[in-house]
Image (cartoon, rainbow, N blue to C red):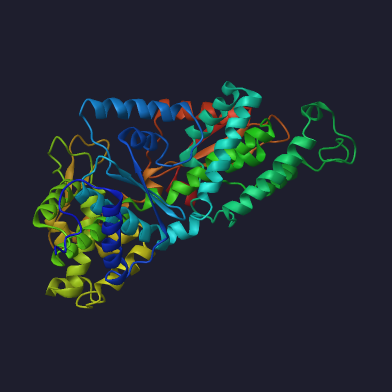
Amino acid sequence: MSALVFEDAEWDFDLLDKAFNAVEDIALNDLELDIFPNQIEIISSEQMLDAYSAHGMPLMYNHWSFGKVFAREETMYQKGYTGLAYEIVINSVPCISFLMEENTMTMQTLVMAHACFGHNHFFKNNYLFRQWTDAEGILDYLGFAKRYIATCEEKYGLAEVEAILDSAHAIMDQGVFRYQRPPRLSEAEQLERVRARLAHDEATFNDLWRTLPKKEGEEGGTPETMTPVEEMVAEDQERMKLPEENLLYFLEKHSPVLRPWQREIVRIVRNVAQYFYPQKQTKVMNEGCATFVHHYIMHEMHRRGQISDGALLEFLHSHSSVIFQPGFDDKRYSGFNPYALGFAMMEDIKRMCENPTDEDKDWFPDLAGKGNWREELKYAWANFRDESFIQQYLSPKVMRDLRLFSIYDKSEDPNYIVSAIHDETGFRKVRNTLAQMYDIGRLEPNLQVVEANVRGDRKLHLQHIMNGSIPLDEKQKEKVLFHIERLWGHEVDFSAVDAGEQAA
C-alpha cells in the first residue's frame, strides 16, 4: 500500500484533510511550532481578487478604493500580466487561511504548510503582534465596523460617509501609535465602549450649543475671570498631550467639527491601521518564517515517502520562483524580495547552528555550533522585527551570496558612490545600511500635531520631523493637508524641521 498522501494533481476535501494532518504532524512534533487553531477556506480566483482589494480581510466595510484595486487587479490577472497569490492568511483566532481552488494538490499542501503553520506561528508569537493586535477580537470588530458604516450610509448618505472615509484613509499611515503603547483593551471591550459612547453622544449632542456664549464661571468665561492667554494655551497643550504622533487619534478626540458618528468612523480606520502596523515592520521575517517552514515540511514529507518525486519537483519549481531575487541591473528589479532575504537568513541560522565556519564563530559566537536551530529560530521569530533581525543575524555569507553592496547618494553630487561591498571591511556598513532600509521611522514621514489653538482661531499646527533633511513631496503634502483640514474643520499650518535640529 502506498504511503503517498496524494498521487496526482486533483484534490478533494478528504485529500486536503489527509495532507493537513501530515503537515500538522511535522509542524507540531518536529518543528515544535506554537499556533492558533486553523480554519481553511477554499475560494475562487474572483474571491481572491476581492480579498486583495480589502486588505486581505474576510470582513471589511465598503469604500470606492477597494473597488478600484479590484478592477485593476482583475484586469492585470485576466490579461496575464500578473498571477494571484496561492493563499491569504488572516491574523485572527481561529487563524483563517484562504486557499485558491485552482491550486493543484501539491500547491494546496505547500500553502497549508506556509500559511496554516508558518504565518500562524509567527502571528501568535512575534512580540509586535502580541503587543499591538488582538487576534481573538478582530473579526468581531470588523463585523461591527462593516455594519456601523453601512448604517451610517443609510442614515446620513453615502457622500457624507465617503468623505470622512476618504480623509481618514488619506492619513492612515499617520494614524498609528508608533512610540507609545495603544490602549490595552480587547476588541470585545472596545465594542462595549463603542456602544455606550455612541448612545451617550447621540443623546447629548446638539449642534446649537456650540453657537451659545459662555456663562461666567464656565470654561472660557469673562475676560475678568480668564487666566492669561499663554497659560490657557499651555493648559490646552497639556490636556491634549501634545505633541501627538497619531493624527487620526488626535482628530478623533479633539476635532471641533466632527459629529459622534464621524468620530466613530475615524476611530474604525485608526484601529484597522493599527492592526496592520506590525505587518509593515515584519515583512521579511514573516515571509521568511513561512517560507522556511514550508520548505522544511515539504522536504520532510518527501523524506518520509508522503509525497512523490514529481510533487517535490513541482514544489521546488514554485519555491524557486517565490525566492527569486533579480539583480540590481535586471529590468525586473524592484527592491529586495522579502521571501528571498528572509528565507536565506533563516536557512543560514540553521547552518550556523549545525555546521559553523571559523568566520561564523568570530561573528556569532553565541550562535555558531549551538546545535538546537529550532529554538534559535523560534527565539528570533518571537523577539525581533525586520530592522533588528537584520542587524542581529545577517551574516557575511548571506551578504556574499546575495552580492550586497552599499551606495552613498548625496543630492548635490551627479554620481552615486559605492561606499561598501561584501568584503571584510564592508560587512558592517552593508548590514547597517540594509537594516536602515527596513526602519519604519525612515520609511514613513514623521508628522506630529505640535499646537492646536482651540480657544481662538482653531488653527492646527503640524510639524514634519525630517529624516536626513528629506522634505515631503509638495503635491502629496497639499493633498494630505486638504484631508486633515476637512477632519479638523479649520486652517492647518505646516512646518518642517530636521530631526537633529529638533533634538537640539
Horizontal relation, residue 20 to residue 325: left or right: right
Q: Front-most of 446 and 486?
A: 486
Q: Is residue 248 visible?
A: no
Which residue lies most toward the front here? 1
Q: Front-most of 349 and 29?
A: 29
Q: Is residue 123 visible?
A: yes
* x, y percent for residue 200: 76, 41
* x, y percent for residue 230: 72, 42
In this view, 130 is above or below 44: below
Horizontal relation, residue 116 to residue 503: left or right: left
* x, y percent for residue 476: 42, 28
In percent of the image, x 46 and y 26: which residue is there?
Answer: 64
In percent of the image, x 23 and y 36: which residue is there?
Answer: 83
* x, y percent for residue 408: 22, 46
In this view, 162 is above or below 252: above
- The image quadrant that residue 100 belongs to is top left
* Number of numbered labels in the structure image: 0
Horizontal relation, residue 102 to residue 97: left or right: left
In percent of the image, x 78 and y 42: which residue is there?
Answer: 228
Q: Front-most of 297 and 9?
A: 9
- The image quadrant that residue 259 belongs to is top right
In percent of the image, x 41 and y 27: which residue is there?
Answer: 67
Query: Quarter holding the N terminus?
Result: bottom left
